[in-house]
Image (spheres, grey):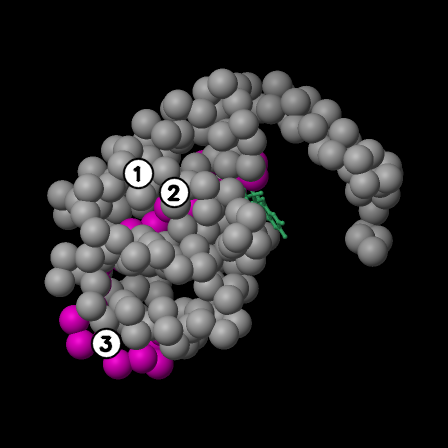
Amino acid sequence: MVKTIIINGSPRAPKSNSKQYAEIFRKYYTGETISFMINNRNHSEICDHIEGCSDIVFVFPLYADGIPSTLLNFLKTLETYQINQKPRVHILINCGFIEPEQNNVALDMMRLFCRQNRYEFSSTLAIGAGEAFLTTPLSFLVKGKIKKFAKLVASKKTEHLSVTLPLSKKSFVKASTKYWIAYGERFGCSKEQMASMKIE
Ligand SMILES: Cc1cc2nc3c(=O)[nH]c(=O)nc-3n(C[C@H](O)[C@H](O)[C@H](O)COP(=O)(O)O)c2cc1C
């Protein structure tokens, strides 16, 4: 039973940054893996596959300082499932802001789930600037950290890792504001419209 299940908990899983991070993890991980993206219909299928695995790697984004509802709903199903040999749980989380510690509350939510449901909570990797990182010339930094995280999972070691773009907060805000204004313009949306509560 040495198989790792990678579970993508992003609400936009097929087009997600989490998907890219999961693929990098898979490239560096030496063990056997199976992968799933959570949707409304596959909770039971994923739970059935968890039974035969030694490790779970949850890969997901930070949403509103917590775990996305897609993942939360899945965890509600998982806690009702009878799993005899519970796998070790590892987390690869990414957030949009530059500070990887923004992810800490979501990690605590996962830690609590594990404690309440008797899963061993093991290694974690918290990525800051997760939306932008892979599009920059510094993407080797996040890839290197994922490689280290993959080694931790394979060697059954428990450690917390984090990584972010080596920019000052001021430079990050300047660059990201420019990026999002240009992004909005492509869809005919002004800076003022994006800053308003009217999202439709
Ligand atoms: C609805 C929503 C809420 C978000 N909330 C946060 C947040 O609280 N803090 C943060 O740093 N990033 C936040 N983000 C940014 C995402 O974490 C970031 O874009 C991430 O790369 C998305 O990953 P994904 O493509 O795997 O879903 C939010 C994004 C969305 C769409």
Check mark 1 vs ligand 1: CB closer than 8 Å? yes or no.
no
Q: Residue at x 24, y 41 (%)?
A: 29
Mark 2–mark 3 distance (CA, rounded to whole Å): 27 Å
- Under mark 2, the amino acid is Glu
User: Is 41 placed above or below 57 here?
Assistant: below
Q: Residues within 10 Å of mark 2 (few under 14, many from 20)?
A: some
In magenta segment, residue 84: yes
Q: Give the number of callouts.
A: 3
Q: Nearer the viewer, residue 162 or 147?
A: 147
Does the residue at mark 2 contact the one at mark 1 (Cβ under 8 Å)?
yes
For residue 105, side relative to residue 192 (left or right): left
Q: Which segment is the magenta one?
A: 78-101
Q: Which residue is mark 1?
A: 27
User: Is 189 placed above or below 58 here?
Assistant: above
What numbered label is drawn on residue 23? 2
For residue 63, side relative to residue 31 (left or right): right
Q: Nearer the viewer, residue 163 or 109?
A: 163
- Under mark 1, the amino acid is Lys
